[in-house]
Image (cartoon, rainbow, N blue to C red):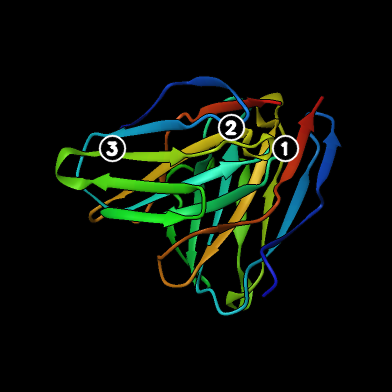
Amino acid sequence: EAGVAQSPRYKIIEKRQSVAFWCNPISGHATLYWYQQILGQGPKLLIQFQNNGVVDDSQLPKDRFSAERLKGVDSTLKIQPAKLEDSAVYLCASSPMGETQYFGPGTRLLVL
Amino acid sequence: GIQVEQSPPDLILQEGANSTLRCNFSDSVNNLQWFHQNPWGQLINLFYIPSGTKQNGRLSATTVATERYSLLYISSSQTTDSGVYFCAVESFGNEKLTFGTGTRLTIIP
């Protein structure tokens, strides 16, 4: 069974630029999550989708972050404009109806 | 929100040693997972264990839900066990995993 796929794996941008990350969950998993992991900390949930609807986006900085999951399968997370403090690893995870979460390899973002 | 504390924050052991990692949480949970984040950053699911005991090879975990803690045991440590171990919990009525700050395990050959 293929795991959660993410791209790109690494991204370096300058502050105020835009960036987008892509995630393809495990086939059949209804729930998709985006996490932000700052160096030395545990992952923090940004947004949770159930199929193509948003379940929780309470910790998503909506003035600069947006996410969508069209057709209830893959998802994109966008940051516009980026700030220095957005430097982190962005992790995508999926699960079958709220059970065990399976994580992708992450996208490492460095904002200069 | 629910608080998750892990101890110890850092652990350095010789290859072959055994270790116990602890996770304390502040409220009742309906989901508890242990993850291993390897040096390349990949989070690997070890156990889904909201209560009871499970074993998988050299690893085992026990969650005592009534006392709000979970333990992860690693026996006969190998260098590939190095990395950060996270406990993450989900409280009732809140479908959101809250992660602890992790235990960084270093196994020396």
Question: Compared to B45, does B25 lie above or below?
Answer: above
Are discs 1 and 3 both within one chain? no
Task: Give the residue drawn at x 52%, y 36%.
Answer: B85
Q: Can residue B45 be seen in this view?
A: yes
Q: How far apart are marks 3 and 2 (CA)?
A: 35 Å
Q: How crowded is mark 3: few (under 14 residues within 10 Å), some or many (20 or more)?
A: some
> Could you tell me how far apart the alpha carbons at marks 1 and 2 are, in whole angstroms?
49 Å
Which is more foreground, mark 1 or mark 3?
3
- Mark 3 or mark 2, which is nearer to you? 2
Q: Considering depth in this image, is B29 or A55 the residue closer to the camera? A: B29
> Which of the chains bears the disc numbered 1?
A
Image quadrant occupied by the N terminus of chain A = bottom right
Closer to the camera in the image, B39 or B80: B80
Query: At 62% across and 71% down in the image, what residue appears?
Result: A26
Is there a contact, CB below 8 Å, between mark 3 and mark 2? no
Q: Which of A67 and B90 is in front in this view?
A: B90
Q: Is disc 1 surrounded by few (<14), some (14 to 19) or many (20+) residues within 10 Å?
A: some
- Say which residue label 2 marks: B16
Badge 3 or badge 2: first in the primary sequence: 3
Name the amino acid, label 1.
Pro
Type of residue at label 3?
Ile
Q: Which amino acid does label 2 sit on?
A: Gly
Instruction: Identify the element where label 2 is drawn.
Output: loop
Chain letter of the residue beneath label 2 in the structure image: B
Residue under pointer 1? A81
Circle 3 is placed at which residue position? B2
Question: Between B109 and A8, which is closer to the camera in this rendering?
Answer: B109
